Image: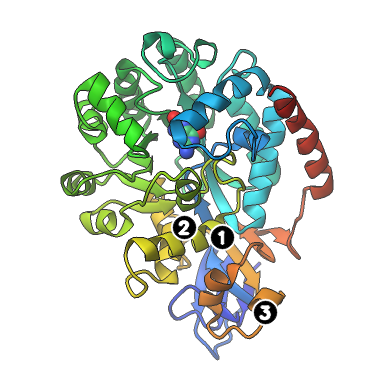
Amino acid sequence: MRLWIKNPLAILAQGAGGGVVVEGGKIVALVASGEAPAHDKVFDASRHVILPGLINTHHHMFQTLTRAHPAAINKELFPWLKALYPIWARNVKPDAFRMASRLALTELMMSGCTTVSDHHYLYPDGLENAMDIQAEEAERLGIRMTLNRGSMSLSEKDGGLPPDSIVQDDDEILADCERVLGKYHDTSEGSMLQVALAPCAPFTVTKNLMVETMKLAEQHNCTCHTHLGETHDENDYCLEHFGCRPVDYLEDLGWMNDRVWLAHGIHFNDDEVARLGKHGVGVCHCPTSNMVLASGHCRTKELEAAGSPVGLGVDGSASNDNSNLIEGVRHALMINRLTYDAASITHFDAFRWATEGSAKCLNRDDIGKIAVGKQADFAMYTLDELRFSGAGDPLAALVLCGAHEADRVMITGEWKVEDAMPVNMDVAKLRYEHGEAAKAFLEAV
Ligand SMILES: Nc1nc2[nH]c(O)nc2c(=O)[nH]1
């Protein structure tokens, strides 16, 4: 069945003014304006602005349960984490975690996201099957996912930041990493599920775990992820505990390679940017979180120029506090204009980070672009709301007027969102059930 997505209002692809043809879950043709390709079925896209499906490269979905939490608002990262660790430790149980994952995945998809990566690093007793829960939820919704088997193994008693109750030991973590890789890591073209190994941060995991994690990733050919360069506190921590800055520490651990993408990547000097770029280390820019936690400005332009892929992430929903990636695209444009200037940063930069750049961070070349041979993943927006009325350039309007929901989302050639609603999810029920699950987190204050 050849589906012609016909004559879009605008599309983020050269030479595709007449739309695209989709067959077998892939893009098989770009249609020039005025042309009519062979097809079996037509979708009239004359109201739609089409982007490649957006790719989210950093989240902590469990944090949807502590949005705008009174104990944590108005704080920078370290005090924010210290306020939330005990609340998470007591309350993130399997059912609540399932609701959190379902909600975040659905919210992301409704914003136009077709591939998600969730950095799950919290394993209190009873939540050992967190990766299995997320794999089930991604499959249920039909969204592509990179499961991040995250970890924390350095608690307060050993000089780390988290309390003892939420760390695991290195051997237990590594055994579960192997289990999850064996069960879920699919590197084939068009894969719906992959696994990344993701020790949380320099101040939450042991050096041994970082080193052993990279060895495992090499054996299983998977990507690696961690937080780095997010705050001045992290710099101070590394200097005090390791006698060097975070990037030197990363190098010492054997993590300077193109399997790795880092969350945040803000506080790097010129020499560090050059070294990260030279080794192809990716950076997930998290503009919303960086503004909420007052963490700083990511050096996106310099990192890309040096050779680092730059992707985009919403970050955990306690430091954002939503899971809306098209809104993140707007925030990326804005904060980068402040970092650089208006002429140096355009909506095309922000789109590139959320699509091609994110795909590169996840080491995927089958998604992130509207081109022949790529997966048929699209985010399609209308400009029908009041906020768009009078807009001239449809692609720029998505970012400047503030698009917040996709009217249509296609993943692997199948419609997953129609008329701004997910096709296989009762959103009202989800809102109720997640809200109920989150109540326990407030009662714990
Ligand atoms: N923005 C965030 N940064 C983090 N660092 C860390 O160790 N955990 C987190 C987190 O949850 N959010």
Say if residue 41 shows up in the picture.
no
Q: Give me the C-alpha separation between circle 1 and circle 3.
A: 18 Å
- Which numbered dot is residue 47? 3
> Who's the residue at 23% across and 28% down the image?
249
- Which numbered dot is residue 108? none
Q: Give me the C-alpha separation between circle 1 and circle 2.
A: 8 Å
Residue projecting furthest to the bottom: 34
Where residue 194 appears, as percent x and y from the top left, is 49, 38
- Identify the image quadrant of the C terminus: top right
Labels 1, 2: front one: 1
Look at the numbered discs 1 and 3 and tell me whether their residues touch, using CB distance below 8 Å. Answer: no
Where residue 407 appears, as percent x and y from the top left, is 69, 66
Where residue 198 appears, as percent x and y from the top left, is 42, 30
Which image quadrant for residue 110?
Answer: bottom right
Which is more N-terminal, label 2 or label 1? 1
Q: Is residue 345 above or below residue 429?
A: below
Per the image, label 1 sits on a secondary structure element best described as: helix
Instruction: Report whether 153 appears left or right of 65.
Output: left
Q: Is residue 182 above or below residue 289?
A: above
Look at the numbered discs 1 and 2 and tell me whether their residues touch, using CB distance below 8 Å. Answer: yes
Residue projecting furthest to the left: 271
Q: Is residue 216 above or below residue 274?
A: above
Q: Give me the C-alpha separation between circle 2 and circle 3.
A: 22 Å
Closer-to-camera residue (259/28): 259
Label 3: few (<14), some (14–19) or many (≥20) C-alpha neighbours in 10 Å: some
Three-letter code for the amino acid on which mark 3 is drawn: Arg
Label 2: few (<14), some (14–19) or many (≥20) C-alpha neighbours in 10 Å: many
Which image quadrant for residue 155?
Answer: top left
The residue where tag 2 is placed is: 354
The residue where tag 1 is placed is: 326
Three-letter code for the amino acid on which mark 1 is drawn: Ile
Labels 1, 3: front one: 1
